[in-house]
Image (spheres, rainbow, N blue to C red):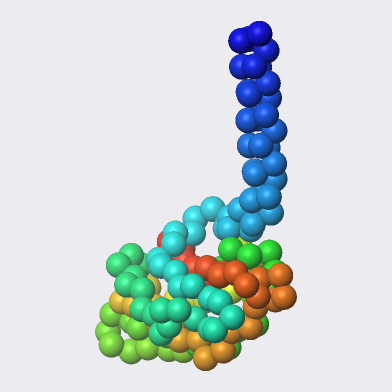
């Protein structure tokens, strides 16, 4: 009798674990970015806009490129700009593109002399989430790539 109860609990636990993993699988898969990208920092997006914007992420390495990515499989309408501040004090701005899908959605080349950047600044002026994300939060992550 005790063996049957233990077996039933193991089976029920396994079924529950598989069900929970199935629910999170769609969202977890889109958080992956291609190899070689390192997260510099993130901000949270919701129906009210961007929590933590404007944001600044230090760039201690000589990143060859920067990227933006989200953790949702749905589109996110964004407007704003990314500013790359170079080690020599100069800077340049790039407009943020809308995220048509999850994961890495925009790549920005490092135009600083010798890739010597000091900071990546993110300023979003408007955010609009897709209906499935309307009551959720979405994480927007800034990345750097060395090669």
User: In the image as oriented, which residue stretches furthest toward the right?
Assistant: 131
Toward which corner of the image does residue 101 lie, by quadrant?
A: bottom right
Q: What's the residue at 43%, 89% (across, down)? A: 92
Tally the numbered discs.
0
Locate residue 58, reporting x and y percent.
32, 72
Above or below: residue 78 compared with residue 61: below
112 or 22, nearer to the observer: 22
Residue 116, visible in the rendered structure: no
Above or below: residue 100 compared with residue 80: above
103 or 85, nearer to the observer: 103
The quadrant of the picture occupied by the N terminus is top right
Above or below: residue 73 compared with residue 93: above
Q: What's the residue at 63%, 23% (across, down)? A: 10
Residue 59, visible in the rendered structure: yes
Locate residue 51, reporting x and y percent.
45, 79
Toward which corner of the image does residue 129 lie, by quadrant?
A: bottom right
Q: What's the residue at 49%, 59% (across, down)? A: 37
Above or below: residue 91 compared with residue 141: below
Q: In the image, is 19 to the left or to the right of 107?
A: right
Q: What's the residue at 67%, 29% (across, down)? A: 12
Locate residue 36, reporting x and y percent.
49, 55
């Amino acid at each position: 009798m005790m063996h049957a109860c233990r077996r039933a609990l193991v089976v029920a636990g396994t079924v529950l674990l598989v069900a929970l993993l199935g629910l999170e699988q769609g969202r977890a898969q889109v958080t992956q970015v291609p190899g070689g990208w390192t997260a510099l920092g993130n901000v949270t997006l919701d129906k009210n806009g961007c929590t933590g914007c404007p944001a600044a992420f230090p760039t201690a390495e000589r990143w060859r490129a920067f990227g933006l990515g989200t953790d949702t499989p749905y589109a996110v309408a964004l407007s704003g700009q990314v500013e790359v501040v170079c080690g020599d004090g100069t800077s340049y701005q790039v407009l943020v593109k809308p995220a048509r899908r999850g994961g890495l959605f925009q790549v920005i080349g490092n135009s600083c002399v010798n890739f010597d950047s000091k900071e990546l600044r993110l300023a979003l002026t408007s955010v609009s989430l897709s209906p499935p994300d309307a009551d959720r939060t979405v994480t927007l992550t800034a990345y750097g790539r060395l090669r």
